[in-house]
Image (cartoon, helix red, strand yellow):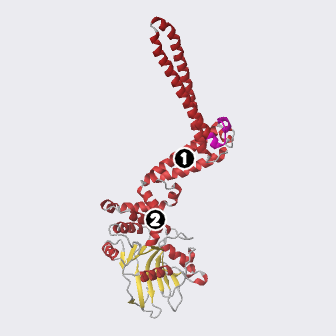
Amino acid sequence: MRFDRLVLSSLAAADRQVALALHPDLTVVTGLGPLERAGLVSDLVGSLGPSRPGVHVELRADDGRRFAIFRPADDVHRVVDVDGRRDVTEDFTDGANGIDLLARAGLDEREARRALCVTAEDLTGEATDGERLQRLAAADQQELWPAAEAVVRHGVQLEQVATEVGGQVEDAEVIASIEERHERFEQAQEESERVRRATFLIAGIAALLSFPLVRLVGDLVVVPLAVIAGAAVVASFVTWRRSERARTAEAEALEVAGATSYLGFHLQRVNSLLGSDLGRQRFLAAAQAHRDALARWRELAGDVPAEWAIDHRRAVEASAVATSQTLAFAERDRPDGRAGETVGALVARLESLRRLGDTEECFPALLDEPFSGVDDRDLPTLLEALVSASRHQQVVLLTDDPRIGGWASAEALTGSLAVCSLQPAVAAGPR
């Protein structure tokens, strides 16, 4: 949904009007103080809600149809299909409330105002999600989404395999830990046996050679043989200790699982899983695939949950577009953390309006001085991000900031936005 035109008629003098023609993408309304901005927001939201005498509006629906809503002070209120040139008032009437587009979307005027109106405080409050959006938007989008989908897909597969083999997802880490430690213990045991056999053989040979060599060479030959035998004993002791440490590590893992031996572990609550080598291997393979997918995702997105990213994919992609549009600013004069957070929070808020209410209609965003307190260095980046975001939905920026007014006047020459200054005028009536 987009506003084409808003006309406010004075109830005291019908020919006294304020008319506001809105750009389909971005309109900057300048010279408004706090009270004027609050009043215009109320009129814009109210034009969609219950009948307000003297508030007339022309709209364009998402499907391209154009409607004009007339609310004269002393006549019947009606809705006209502009292209079809027919009265469609009944389609937009909500019982006693009269013409009410908000009710069609399952909203009341208070909820709609809270959703559509965005202030500087709102953007600051949404900075946490904004940080996530900025982090994801900065990642390679071609790699990001396959990685997120892989995490979710492998997580679902792990849950399915766990259910099929009679285990739980939480068992995977315990089982993997026990399997790994048991494998290390077996390797340590094998190494210990090899070293023990070798050292016994070396010690035995040294002992056998000592007697004839003493008679042939003398007593001094005993020293190197004793050293060799001692080294063999030390090597045997070291490998034995290594085997014992591996045994202790396995015991600790088994204790976590509630078993006192590796065989006992097979007979515990996951006996149905580990009783079958095929089931165990399927479960461990699914768990490993999920861990690998999660590791890849964390390389790209840090600690942002993959599920959260998928739920906010459209906002992330929109933020990525905004980031690319403002790359030149960022490279020339990189903004501080607050600017990035504000862009992310703004994109997230705009995204929430694109499927608002029961009808999932895209509603316009009404920005009430959203960049107050932003320094001169960061403001161009935020404004460029706003222009980029407005290509996906209509944005009305209400401001009294001369910096924004000057920027908007220059940008209006390109046709990417319109600048309006509300001034009462005498007119024949709404067209």
76 vs 362: above or below = below
Residue flagged by tag 1: what amino acid is it?
A: His
Mark 1, residue position: 290
The structure residue drawn at horizontal position 42% and vertical position 83%, both measured from the top left corner, is: 36
Disc 1 element: helix
The C terminus - image quarter: bottom left
Q: Quadrant of residue 188?
A: top right
Q: Quadrant of residue 357?
A: bottom right
The structure residue drawn at horizontal position 51% and vertical position 79%, both measured from the top left corner, is: 48
Mark 2, residue position: 127
The structure residue drawn at horizontal position 50% and vertical position 20%, both measured from the top left corner, is: 230
274 vs 9: above or below = above
The x, y position of residue 420, in whole percent, is 37, 80
Residue flagged by tag 2: what amino acid is it?
A: Ala
Looking at the rendering, the stretch of residues picked out in magenta corresponds to: 253-265
Q: Is residue 126 visible?
A: yes
